[in-house]
Structures are given as structure tokens and as C-alpha cells.
Image (tube, grey):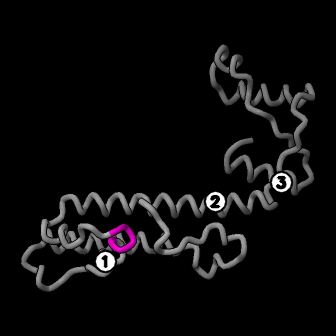
């Protein structure tokens, strides 16, 4: 069984004391010859178990590997979100008002994010809706970057398992 549903079903069956075997993926030449098909894959898996070729016991999914998998899922999500936000922030800067762009030019990434996070809307930009929208957008993106950078320092993540996930606010690179 593969994927989240297969893993959950496997855990349930193991908890019910049903023997579950782990079967490697079907032979590639057979798949090319017969075509990809879930019923054919199921038949091949059943044949592998019945013939004794598939003797590996299915993983229980309740040990340290599953714990690490969950932490990695959260970390990967935060990294992806942060990377997208950094890319979006830089894309907004390319089209920003020249005065605003020059004010932010030359800042390294951490300083740029800190500065943009404090931008927000200003009353003196009220006449120029595009500049106002740009400042607000830069602020929102920078705050998203800061949130994903400090995600590992959240109270729910204070266990020793999260040490490898913690990231200092200024320790990211775009």
C-alpha cells in the first residue's frame, strides 16, 4: 500500500492483528508490456505475497520514523511558504515605485524583511493608491516570511525533536 491512505489502512489492519505485507513496486518490464493499471498492480502484489517473494512486514507507522516524517512535513511546508513569499516580495520590489525601491535597495535579506514588515500603509501615500497597495503588500509578505522563519520557536514545537527545525530569524537565505 502506498500513500497516506495506504499507510493509515496498514496501521489500522496491524492494530487489528491482521498480517500486512510490504510489496515492492511491480516489475517495470511487466508494467510496460501490460500497461499501468491498479487491478493489474493489485494482482501482481497478491502473486508476490502468495509466492513468498514479498516477505517484508509492513511498517507500523507509529515509531520515530513517523515522528520525523511529521516534523519534516511541517518544516518542508514552512520552507516552501517562506521561499514563495521571498520570491513574491522581490517581484513586487521590481515593479515598486522608484522612490520606495531605492529606499530598500542595498539591504541584505534579513534587513529587507524587517524593514518591509514595518512598512504598512502611510497617510502621506493616501493620494497614490498603487504606492499604498505596494507598501501593504510588501508588509504582508515580509510578515509571512518572519512567521515562517520563527515557526520552529513556537511553544508547540519546544520539544528536543524540533531542535533541527528551529531557525533563527536572520538565518534564512533567498
Residue under circle 2?
A: 72
Residue under circle 1?
A: 115
Q: 3 left or right of 120?
A: right
Figure quadrant of residue 53: top right
Q: Residues within 10 Å of mark 2 (few under 14, many from 20)?
A: some
Bounds of the magenta span?
Answer: 108-112
Query: Are the residues at dot 3 and dot 2 in contact (C-beta closer than 8 Å)?
Result: no
Residue at image coords 47%, 66%: 172
Mark toward the start of the polypeptide (3 vs 1): 3
Query: Closer to us: mark 3 or mark 1?
Result: 1
Magenta highlight on residue 16: no
Q: Residue furthest top?
A: 33
Query: Are the residues at dot 3 and dot 1 in contact (C-beta closer than 8 Å)?
Result: no
Q: So how many labels did they put on this image? A: 3
Q: 58 left or right of 67?
A: right
Q: 142 left or right of 158?
A: left
Residue 174, x across and y down, in percent:
41, 59
Residue at image coords 20%, 73%: 103
Mark drawn on residue 168: none
Q: Residue furthest front?
A: 106
Q: Is 161 situated above or below 81?
A: below
Amino acid at each position: 500500500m502506498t500513500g497516506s491512505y495506504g499507510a493509515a489502512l496498514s496501521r489500522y489492519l496491524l492494530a487489528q492483528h491482521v498480517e500486512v505485507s510490504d510489496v515492492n513496486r511491480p516489475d517495470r518490464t511487466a508494467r510496460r508490456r501490460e500497461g499501468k493499471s491498479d487491478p493489474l498492480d493489485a494482482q501482481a502484489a497478491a502473486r508476490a505475497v502468495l509466492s513468498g517473494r514479498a516477505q517484508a512486514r509492513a511498517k507500523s507507522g507509529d515509531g520515530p520514523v513517523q515522528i520525523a516524517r511529521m516534523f519534516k512535513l511541517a518544516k518542508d511546508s514552512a520552507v516552501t511558504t517562506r521561499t514563495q513569499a521571498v520570491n513574491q516580495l522581490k517581484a513586487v520590489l521590481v515593479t515598486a515605485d522608484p522612490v520606495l525601491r531605492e529606499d530598500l535597495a542595498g539591504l541584505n535579506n534579513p534587513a529587507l524583511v524587517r524593514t518591509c514588515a514595518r512598512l504598512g500603509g502611510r497617510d502621506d501615500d493616501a493620494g497614490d493608491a498603487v504606492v499604498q497597495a505596494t507598501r501593504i503588500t510588501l508588509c504582508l509578505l515580509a510578515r509571512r516570511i518572519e512567521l515562517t522563519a520563527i515557526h520552529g520557536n513556537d511553544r508547540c514545537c519546544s520539544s528536543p525533536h524540533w531542535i533541527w527545525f528551529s531557525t533563527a530569524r536572520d538565518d534564512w537565505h533567498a
